[in-house]
Image (spheres, rainbow, N blue to C red):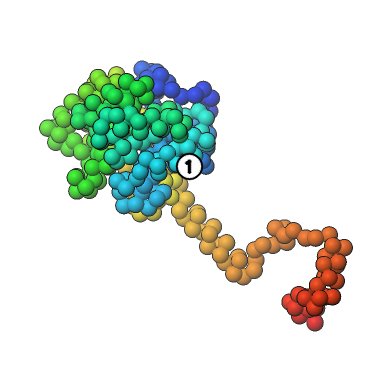
Amino acid sequence: MSVQTVPSPEKVTVRTLWRKKRRGEPITMLTAYDYPSARFVDRAGIDVILVGDSLGMVVLGYETTVPVTMEDMLHHARAVARGAQRALLVGDMPFLSYHTTPADAVRNAGRFLQEAGMDAVKLEGGRERLEVIRAILNAGIPVLGHIGLQPQRVHQLGGFRAQGRTAAAAQELIEDALALQEAGVFALVLESVPAEVARAITRLLDIPTIGIGAGPDCDGQVLVYHDLLGLYDRGVPRFVRQYARLADVIHDALTRYREDVERRAFPAEEHTLHMKPEEAQALEAWLRARGLSDSREADRGA
Ligand code: KIV
């Protein structure tokens, strides 16, 4: 049996994450996409809720995150903000919302804070995104970086492939990490990189690293809600630990509901509302007088 710890009720800020890094305390982060998932994640004491563009795959049913729009993200981010009080809330900037001009990027990043109640934004990319990151930071919007596998580049990469597997590729990632820290990102997501690379980056940076498929040495870990809970049945990455298999629980519940309705076992008496007897009799008399009496009742009586 697991012993459940009680998290501090204080609102998590970027400073909480820096303090955790200094003290060597692991940072927890999880995605959420709607009101109920945000409530569950917040109540579990997770430090950071990411409204990830992974919602394109696990909620909207796309093959990749590329089709996700700003409007999709804001719609889900608003619901998450209504469900969470404690966690730091990060809105994920979707494909093409920060790739055109720094002005577009600032406007879109600002919408996450102004229209959707987010505390910060995340965007994918290394040194090629420095100008945009600086512009967003200049507007007073905290930015979470994201390097390693960048799912928005899936078509360029030819699939969801681990990054930084050679010494040369790892050096590029380390240069990206240092440049993003220098620019001012408050933390850095490392996705699908070898543990050796994540360990080196984590040691070199003063800001926290948050890994997903990046081994045990990052300052924190992030997973996709649907992967952790076994809600997404279209393949789960090797780096995920499934803490539940809710897809099976849901399938079983829905099948039992269908069967109960089909064999008239639901609704049962305890789910049923009745009129007061005198009202039922008056209604029956009224129906009979008009020749509208329930034939099933008559059959049953016969
Ligand atoms: O969109 C997402 O869920 C993410 C995490 C995998 C870090 O970017």
Q: Residue at the location (15% across, 34% down)?
A: 169
Viewer-proximal residue, 139 or 167? Answer: 139
Residue 47 shows in this picture? no
Relative depth, front residue between 55 and 195: 55
Please give the name of the residue rendered at 32% of the width and 45% of the height, measured from the top-left corner.
65
Residue 18 placement (x, y as % from top left): 37, 19
To which residue does mark 1 refer?
Answer: 34
Question: As drawn, is 186 to the left or to the right of 33?
Answer: left
Residue 275 coordinates in the image, percent (x, y): 80, 60
Residue at 82% over, 67% down:
283
Against 16, residue 234 (above or below) is below
Residue at screen point 50% across, 54% down: 249
Furthest toward the bottom, the residue is 302
Number of numbered tags placed on the structure image: 1
Q: Amino acid at mark 1?
A: Asp
* Crowd class of label 1 (few under 14; some 14 to 19; many from 20; radius 10 Å): many
The percent position of residue 35, horizontal first and vertical second, equals 51, 40
**On screen, 279 above or below 170?**
below
Name the quadrant of the C terminus.
bottom right
Q: Along the horizontal axis of the image, is 27 left or right of 86?
A: left
Judged from the image, the secondary structure of the residue bearing numbered disc 1 is: loop
Q: Quadrant of residue 197?
A: top left
Give residue 113's quadrant in the image.
top left
In the shown orientation, is residue 132 left or right of residue 107?
left
